[in-house]
Amino acid sequence: MGKGGGCFPSKNKITKTTNKYANSATKSTAADTTVTSPTKNLKVFIVFYSMYGHVESLAKRMKKGVGTVDGVEGLLYRVPETLSEDVLVQMQVPPKDDTILELPSPLELVDADGFLFGFPTRYGCMAAQMKAFFDSTGLLWKEQKLAGKPAGFFVSTGSQGGGQETTAWTAITQLAHHGMLFVPIGYTFGADMFDMDFIRGGSPYGAGVFAGDGSRKATETELAVAEYQGKYMAAVVKKLVHG
């Protein structure tokens, strides 16, 4: 007891009381600083070259298909043009949709969880613009930055015998050297892939469109296959990442 008839509590009681409030404050702080990280969407890059808009029409529907799978988003990118403006004018190439950005750098590909590459045919192989883009991925190839990532193809040809299958088939070499996984759609789209009553682009390798002389537009069936391929790829990407 201190002087003054016990007006002051003992030292032991002061210490005990102080610790009680200190512990309470510590618990409150820990609770307040707990942050829940938002779930990050998986990304499918839809990278394409389109001269007259046929491949682009498929790409846009693929983006829609990708978006139907929860937790996955599709991003549209063009590859750089290699022809001069004068040549494009002589070929009567229409203006490109400026809402679709050109891929800033091949190095951006590492941010994707999966890919859909689209291009028109040139003598049964991919157009030079797309080949030039793949040729620019040397640093990624050297470090195998894309190894294990899934990818698919979609194409445009001028006629039924113009390379709907060979254009995709010959492009597989690009994926093989990067160690990427080729994901075809097979015949999973269903009965319309066997229908012989109408002309339709596409194959087990992926969606496709017949451009004819350039004036023909993609049919609803061709667009539906493209949308389906987007959804199919998104589901594959999600399964590979999350199991």
Image (cartoon, rainbow, N blue to C red):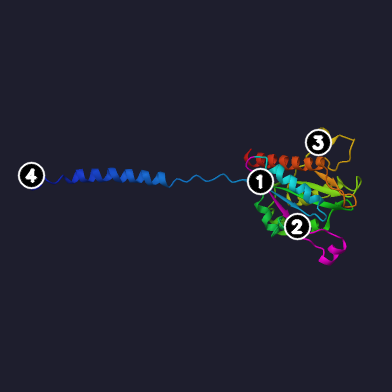
SS at badge 3 = loop
- Inspect this view and state whether residue 106 appears: yes
The Cα atoms of the two marked residues, 1 and 2, are separated by: 19 Å
Q: Amino acid at mark 4?
A: Gly
Q: Residues within 10 Å of mark 1 (few under 14, many from 20)?
A: some
Instruction: Give yes or no for contact between labels 3 and 2 (Cβ–Cβ under 8 Å).
Output: no
Mark 1 secondary-structure assignment: strand
Mark 4, secondary structure of its residue: loop
Marks 1 and 4, how far apart at CA: 76 Å
C-alpha separation, residue under disc 2 versus residue under disc 4: 90 Å
Which x, y percent locates residue 91?
87, 61
Residue labelled with disc 3: 187
Give the CA separation, mark 4 to mark 3.
96 Å
| Camera-nearest label, 1 or 4 | 1
**Mark before the other along the chain sequence, 4 or 3:** 4
Lateral position of residue 220 relative to residue 67, left or right: right
Using a 10 Å C-alpha cutoff, classify the residue at mark 2 as few (fewer than 14 neighbours), some (14 to 19) or many (20 or more). many
Give the residue at the far left of this rendering: 4
* Residue 80 picture location, percent across and down: 76, 60
Q: Which residues are magenta?
A: 70-96
| Side (left or right) of 111 relative to 220 | left
**Which residue is tagged 4?**
5
Q: Residue at x 30, y 46 (%)?
A: 22
Give the number of the disc on residue 79.
2
**Which amino acid, by three-letter code, is at mark 1?**
Glu
Q: Nearer the viewer, residue 28 or 54?
A: 54
Task: Give the side of residue 128 with respect to residue 241, left or right.
Answer: right
Q: Amino acid at mark 2?
A: Val
Which is more N-terminal, label 3 or label 1? 1
Point out the tag, 3 or 2, that comes first from the N-terminus: 2
* Residue behind mark 1: 73
